[in-house]
Image: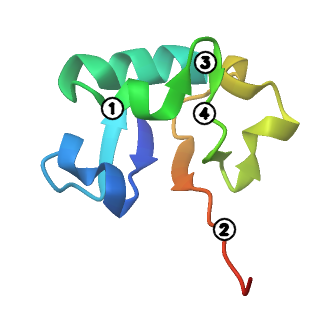
Protein backbone atom coordinates (compact mmCIF):
# COMPACT_ATOMS: atom_id res chain seq x y z
CA UNK A 1 0.00 0.00 0.00
CA UNK A 2 1.58 3.28 -1.11
CA UNK A 3 0.62 6.54 0.57
CA UNK A 4 2.16 9.87 -0.36
CA UNK A 5 3.08 12.03 2.63
CA UNK A 6 3.74 15.72 2.00
CA UNK A 7 6.33 17.08 4.39
CA UNK A 8 6.44 20.72 5.55
CA UNK A 9 9.72 22.63 5.35
CA UNK A 10 10.29 22.46 9.11
CA UNK A 11 10.29 18.62 9.06
CA UNK A 12 12.36 18.12 5.89
CA UNK A 13 15.50 17.80 7.98
CA UNK A 14 14.20 14.30 8.78
CA UNK A 15 13.53 13.42 5.13
CA UNK A 16 16.86 14.62 3.72
CA UNK A 17 15.08 17.61 2.18
CA UNK A 18 12.36 15.63 0.42
CA UNK A 19 9.07 17.51 0.01
CA UNK A 20 7.15 14.24 -0.18
CA UNK A 21 7.88 10.66 0.85
CA UNK A 22 6.06 7.36 0.51
CA UNK A 23 4.87 5.33 3.43
CA UNK A 24 2.51 2.52 4.24
CA UNK A 25 0.06 1.58 6.94
CA UNK A 26 -3.62 0.93 7.42
CA UNK A 27 -3.98 3.85 9.87
CA UNK A 28 -2.19 7.15 10.38
CA UNK A 29 -0.55 5.73 13.51
CA UNK A 30 0.85 2.83 11.46
CA UNK A 31 1.94 5.24 8.71
CA UNK A 32 3.83 7.43 11.18
CA UNK A 33 5.51 4.35 12.68
CA UNK A 34 6.50 3.26 9.16
CA UNK A 35 7.94 6.70 8.39
CA UNK A 36 9.96 6.55 11.60
CA UNK A 37 11.78 3.42 10.34
CA UNK A 38 13.25 5.41 7.43
CA UNK A 39 13.19 8.95 8.81
CA UNK A 40 14.28 8.69 12.44
CA UNK A 41 12.91 11.43 14.68
CA UNK A 42 9.96 12.47 12.52
CA UNK A 43 7.30 10.59 14.47
CA UNK A 44 8.04 12.43 17.72
CA UNK A 45 7.55 15.75 15.91
CA UNK A 46 4.05 14.71 14.77
CA UNK A 47 2.68 12.50 17.53
CA UNK A 48 2.60 12.94 21.30
CA UNK A 49 1.68 9.67 22.97
CA UNK A 50 -1.45 8.41 21.24
CA UNK A 51 -2.57 11.66 19.64
CA UNK A 52 -1.38 14.33 17.24
CA UNK A 53 0.73 17.10 18.68
CA UNK A 54 -1.29 20.19 19.46
CA UNK A 55 0.34 22.42 16.85
CA UNK A 56 0.46 19.92 14.00
CA UNK A 57 -2.35 19.60 11.49
CA UNK A 58 -2.68 16.47 9.38
CA UNK A 59 -4.92 16.19 6.34
CA UNK A 60 -6.03 13.02 4.60
CA UNK A 61 -6.97 13.83 1.02
CA UNK A 62 -7.55 17.47 2.09
CA UNK A 63 -9.73 16.57 5.10
CA UNK A 64 -8.54 17.43 8.63
CA UNK A 65 -8.04 14.13 10.46
CA UNK A 66 -9.08 15.73 13.77
CA UNK A 67 -12.62 15.59 12.37
CA UNK A 68 -12.15 11.96 11.38
CA UNK A 69 -10.54 9.47 13.80
CA UNK A 70 -7.29 11.32 14.55
CA UNK A 71 -4.26 9.06 14.34
CA UNK A 72 -6.60 6.06 14.14
CA UNK A 73 -7.97 7.29 10.81
CA UNK A 74 -8.02 4.46 8.28
CA UNK A 75 -5.92 4.76 5.12
CA UNK A 76 -6.23 3.25 1.68
CA UNK A 77 -3.79 2.69 -1.15
CA UNK A 78 -3.24 5.90 -3.09
CA UNK A 79 -4.25 8.23 -0.26
CA UNK A 80 -2.40 11.49 0.23
CA UNK A 81 -1.44 12.75 3.69
CA UNK A 82 -0.32 16.33 4.25
CA UNK A 83 1.43 17.40 7.46
CA UNK A 84 1.24 21.11 8.26
CA UNK A 85 2.48 22.99 11.29
CA UNK A 86 -0.26 25.13 12.81
CA UNK A 87 0.22 28.79 12.11
CA UNK A 88 -0.58 31.42 14.70
CA UNK A 89 -0.04 35.07 14.53
CA UNK A 90 -1.59 38.41 14.13
CA UNK A 91 -1.20 41.70 15.81
CA UNK A 92 -0.88 41.94 19.56
On residue 53, which mark appears? 4
Q: Is residue 90 above or below residue 50?
A: below
* Residue located farthest toward the bottom when viewing the structure as drawn: 91
In screen coordinates, is 81 left or right of 6?
A: right
Mark 3–mark 2 Cα distance, whole angstroms, equals 28 Å
Residues under labels 4 and 3: Cα distance?
Answer: 17 Å
> Label for residue 27?
3
Q: Residues within 10 Å of mark 4 (few under 14, many from 20)?
A: some
Instruction: Compare marks 2 and 4 and give the one earlier in the sequence.
Output: 4
Q: Residue furthest right?
A: 67
Callout 4 secondary element: loop
Return the residue at label 2: 88
User: Mark 2: which secondary structure?
Assistant: loop
**Rounded to the nearest whole Å, what is the CA distance between mark 2 and mark 1?**
22 Å
Percent position of residue 39, x then y: 22, 30
Observer able to see residue 1: no
Sequence order check, earlier mark of 3 and 2:
3
Q: Are marks 3 and 2 in contact (CB under 8 Å)?
A: no
Q: Which residue is mark 1?
A: 42
**Among numbered discs 2 and 1, the one appearing first in the sequence:** 1
Which of the two marks, 4 or 3, is nearer to us in this view?
4
Quarter of the rendering occupied by the C terminus:
bottom right
Callout in the foreground (2, 1)? 2
Rendered location of residue 35, percent (x, y):
33, 26
| Residue 80: image location, x then y, percent | 54, 47
Query: Which badge, 4 or 3, is on the more N-terminal residue?
Result: 3
Amino acid sequence: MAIEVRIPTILRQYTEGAKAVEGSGDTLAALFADLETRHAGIQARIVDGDQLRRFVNVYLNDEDVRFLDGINTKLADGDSVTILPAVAGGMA
